[in-house]
Image: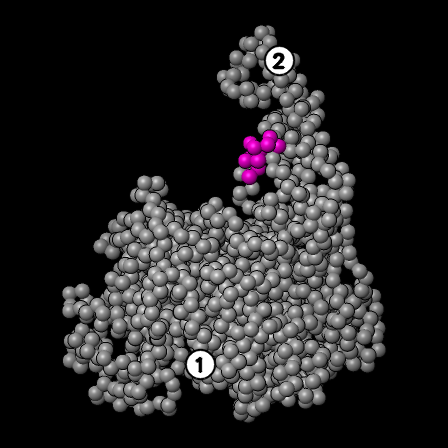
Amino acid sequence: MNTPLNRRHFLRTSTALIALPVLESLGFRRFASAAQTQSRGPRPKRIIFLGFGWGVTQDSWYPNIAQPGSDYTLPAGLEPLARHKADFSVVQGLLNKYNSNGHYGSTFWLTGANEFGEPGQSFHNTISADQVAGETLGKGARFDSLVLDCGAAALASGHGQGLSLSWDIRGKPMAGPKNPVEAFHRLFAKDTTPLAQQKAMLAQRRSVLDNALENARELQRTLSKTDNSKLDEYFQGIRDIETRLSRDEKWLGVPQPTPPLKEPKPDLAGYEEIKLMYAIMVAALQTDSTRVLTYRQPVSTLLTSLDVRIDSHTMSHYPGKGPEYLEASEKRDHAQSTLLAELLDQLKAVKEPDGSSLFDHTTVAYGSNIRTGHNLDNCPTLLAGRGAGLKLGHNIVVSKDTPLCNAWLTLLKGSGVPVERHGDSTGVLPQLLA
Amino acid sequence: MRLPRLTLTGCISLSFVLWAGNNIPLLAEESPKAVMPDRHQSLLKENCQGCHGPEKQKGKFRVDDLPLHITDLPSAERWQKVLGAMNSGEMPPEDEKQPEAKAKTDFLDDLANVLVTARRALSDQHGVIALRRLNRREYQNTIRALLGVEIDGSALPSDTGGPNFDTVGANLFLTGNQFEQYESLGREALEQAFSAKVAGTVSLKQHLESETLNPVFLKKNKETLAAQEGAKNWIKAVDDAAARPANSATVANLRKIAPSNDALRYHWKKIPGAPSPLEFGFHKSTEVNPAEIYLYREFTEFAPYDQYYLGLPHLDRGAYLTVQTRVGGGNNVTAIQGLAIPPKFPPGEYVVRIRAGATAEAPAERRFLEFGLKGFQGGATPALSTHHITGTLEDPQVIEIPFTFSKQNADRGLRNLFIRERGAADGKHDQRVKEAYKRNGFGPEVALWIDWIEIEKQITPEDAPPAGVRVLDLPLDDKTTDVPRDRVRSAVEGFVREAYRGVPAPEGLLDRLMGLYESRKASGKTHRDALIHSLSTVLSSPRFLYRAEPDANATHRTLSGQELASRLSYFLWGGPPDATLRELADKGELLKPEVLAAQTNRLLQHPNSRHFVRPFLTQWLHLDRIDLFQFNQKRFPQFDDSMKSTVRQEVYETFAHLLHTNGSLGELLRADYVLVNGLLARYYGIEGVSGDGFQKVVLPAGSPRGGLLGMAAIMAMGSNGEHTNPVERGAWVLRKLLNEPPPPAPANVPEIARLAAKALTTRERLQAHQENPQCASCHRKIDPIGFGLENFDATGQWRDTDWYQPVSASGERDPKLRKTWKIDPASAFYKGSAFSNYQEMRDLIATKRRNFANGFCSALIEYALGRPCGFSDEGLIESIVQQSEAKDFSTREFIHALIQSKEFRSK
């Protein structure tokens, strides 16, 4: 069936997609082809970062540090992950030394930046690990990376500043789909426009962008230096779109596959929302739409969906409060671990063309910059998947206050990203490698 | 009396104190300085230097050469490390000599504050305003002013939630995704505006006489009663058949799998003589599954309710709001599908009118009506407004409810109006129905009566059509194919000037826009499509999205009239300048101080000033905190959604009142009056106030109300929806009222866990903060203020006692452990005066008008100028506050002084 050519064709923004459910998305069709063309070569590496804001329950989430190695007792907070015990490791002792804000569970989690690192600026951040990975691993997929968020629920979820877990190469916050429906549309909106029309539309699109650049140049000539450094964001934004268009062009005419799951229902919140987002993330990898994903998860609405009526910030300060607060915190851990276990199930179940599973080529990093309350040391860190050659099945205790960025560096290098430093890293962590 | 002072008055004179052997040059003179007081050297020397001195340098960290005056980032980092290590208890190590508790507390106190000072000094932008993008709400306001349409901005970043106001340019980012969102929103806005223009200014109005709903109800009622009768009869018929001796063996056999009577009837077909439910008027599906029949049997309590309703007077000319019955949908007017914004009505400004009255018997607390939107397929907004019904059945009133039908709600299909009694939708509803049923045998008596309801799309003559549409003197329908090029060109030129807030189209732009128009037409599109294609690029161009103040030479220059007009209107209206401002700007009049002052007054008096009052107060006072948690509805049944939005409204209304009457800002600290409406007056126990409009009421002597601290919204923010949070409240008072903000919550301080399951009073629990220097360094200032506010419960109601009930190890609440205590608000400010109750504390705070004014002023500067307020602004703050102080801190004076300042008037 052919729908008439739609002027809004090129818009991949979430608004447009929500407003116009039939909106086509140019270039989706590459998914199938990517999977086909690469079916014989080595499978691409993938990375998933999952951040959950307000830390974990100190006494029931971390394995005993006196039991390092593979023979450790799985603590109650990780109990739902029991069936995967041999396939993930918990790393203890990691720290983002510059973060001193007890309410920023995600702002610097993947960047390791110093908020005050830029004189004359009240806030400063640097590129996040996923964006570093996207530059290398993203090549050949529809999206360099896919940045997922939880919208308004982020505010009370202990994430801190930012629009997602991701920060671009200039340290600016990156936005992305804010719920499963938006994510689904971003990935799987259908495109049935005839090829000639698509080419014509690309040409029109370019002329619109040329005009935007010309408008910006005209303004640029009149502005001061400081204003121009702000206007650079505009230029950069247009260039990002142009880069994407060039990629879209290469994929013109490649037939599109069917999304491996149904269009999600709107208005899901909390537990079901995360579950669905995980399913969409697996679908994104399965169709090779992207190879790098981040997801800033809702914690406040997760609690509500678990019928916990304690607000999430108070819950994170459970020590010194009534046992109901501790109970809420544990309930949160249990739910998050259950969801993670299901995600690992799915990664193991999805087969690659060569018979291996997605799990064999993917690394999942799951954690927060906050341990418990306002504590920012021993950042909860759980690594799973065989994509980066990491040692799995272990309770890995590294020396106290090892840079968290060392773990990111290890993960990046293990996934084949040619990078020597990240954030405040001082080197790879051999303890993490198999 | 003395209140705590956090500034380091004692050390300002130590402009240059370094440890021996260090040679960092002096920075230019600035005040205040981030200087660690000299007296703390002894602590470092005695407790740290042994390992971190010139000899040992453990961890490659030395404290002996730490500069006391922090002037650069590396020194700040080193001090931050000291603070972090001591806060976390890591240093000094447990087996080493520990500093004396008081000395450690003072050390941490000073260090945390010196670091805040240092961070502020180091991040000072020295008056430079980063190029400002329109933030989300400014963008929405701008599109509304230009095109007269409501867009759904929810896909754009909200721009709030950071440490600064949403006007601060440096934090307003733009990405490729966002650019595409602007393109799509711009196109949609143009589509809507064109369609509205084509449709013309026909009145869009829907009128519904509510008595027309009664026959619908009557029919439903009859069906329900018939179904109940049918259920009774079918059940009896099957039971009779089962009881026949001839069927006893069959029944005994069936009983093995279906022991109960209800289960047995599922097998009616196997019982000879048992009739089909079809014979009793039920649907075919009940032959297989009689569950629906059982449902009718069980909900018989609504039959008497329906009968009660049908016996009420005045059904010939109206309808009552009722409970929602579970079978058949009830007679609730809101259940009727006709009560909706028709599909052809576009998003925009609407007014709903309801002619309503309360029954003579309606108790005072049941005379409130909630209004909102819901969808056919589920989904609903929270109550958008709550209204006090003061009319009667004989003499009903007409309530006018202006509301914005947003694009977002239209997209979600939320077109049905809900009009319900307040509290009808909260969790307590079922309980109330049950209680009433027990009492009178039918259910809650009706309280509110509706005569008619009217929905009207508003057209205000002053902005119809809005500026951006007015200049498009062209056909905008989708049939026209050819329009003379010069007409298009001159219309586009006019549009650009409107979109660019008075700046004419730069050279070349018109050619490019015409090029886009032509090429779109050449590809077979209509004139309308091509025009939208071309104009939408104007709405995503940097001149539209950014409030550019061109200045290639980077010198501080005076703003042009147009630039000043924009600054003024985005400050006080959150949107673009109107025709009057633009005209004054063009003529150069606006640059005259007296004209500027007159325009400032005009803008503040205009309803659009709500676009300043709401966002400014919400962000300044952190009012969003009230939405972070759910209030326990069992404990606080009065504090529902309606009340939550009303108590927020009180804050805005009070400030707006000060603006309009030019009252003293000090009245936010203490006032002998409140602004309340009928709903809020009831909540505060104030007699004689009715209606929805907020009105000024003078308080009796000794009332805890009056001023911000007496407002339920402010107290509710300092809770978690269940219990009060004295720490949050104390810190808020220090930050917002006394302008002595405590440093940010430090990382890695060990929590005090040992008190968890103990039955202690709030004060006893918080007392633990004083045992530990890491906690005491801040909490000795914060907690006493929190204690003074303990007479306000989690929802801002006055109370004399509080209670706590720990949960036992097995997870149960043991009533024996419940502890109740009389609240003791007496305390003392740290190094300051003592107070014996809330009123005394409030009055002490109220003497600190100057502190409050300073804090307010720096917030205002940041909001208006779009950059953080730094130490280099001390002079500006001082002059604004002095000018206002001379006029008894009159609220408008702050705004006038700021707008007339060099900083506001120059780039």
In the image, is residue B437 part of the stretch drawn in magenta? yes
Question: What amino acid is found at the position of numbered circle 1 in the picture?
Answer: Gly
Quadrant of res A177: bottom right
Q: Which residue is at a point 74% across and 39% down the rendered structure image? A: B315
The residue tagged with tag 1: helix, strand or loop? loop
Q: Is residue B576 above or below residue B433?
A: below
Q: Which residue is at the front of the view, B314 or B753?
A: B314
Could one spot residue B574 in this view of the protein? no
Residue A91 screen position, x and y as percent: 31, 59
Q: How many marks?
A: 2
Q: Is residue B211 above or below residue A113?
A: above
Q: Which residue is at the front of the view, A103 or B383?
A: B383
- The chain letter for the residue carrying disc 1 is B
Q: Which residue is at a point 66% across and 18% down the rendered structure image? A: B275
| Earlier sequence position, callout 1 versus callout 2 | 2
Residue B241: give its label: 2
Residue A58 screen position, x and y as percent: 31, 55
Q: Nearer the viewer, mark 1 or mark 2?
A: 1
Question: What amino acid is found at the position of numbered circle 2 in the picture?
Answer: Ala
The C terminus of chain A - image quarter: bottom left
Q: Is residue A60 above or below residue B305?
A: below
Residue B491 screen position, x and y as percent: 78, 78
Whole-angstrom CA distance, mark 1 to mark 2, is 89 Å
Do the numbered discs 1 and 2 sit on residues whose CB atoms are within 8 Å? no
Specify whether A213 is left or right of A151.
Answer: right
Residue B870: give its label: 1
Region rendered in magenta = B432-442
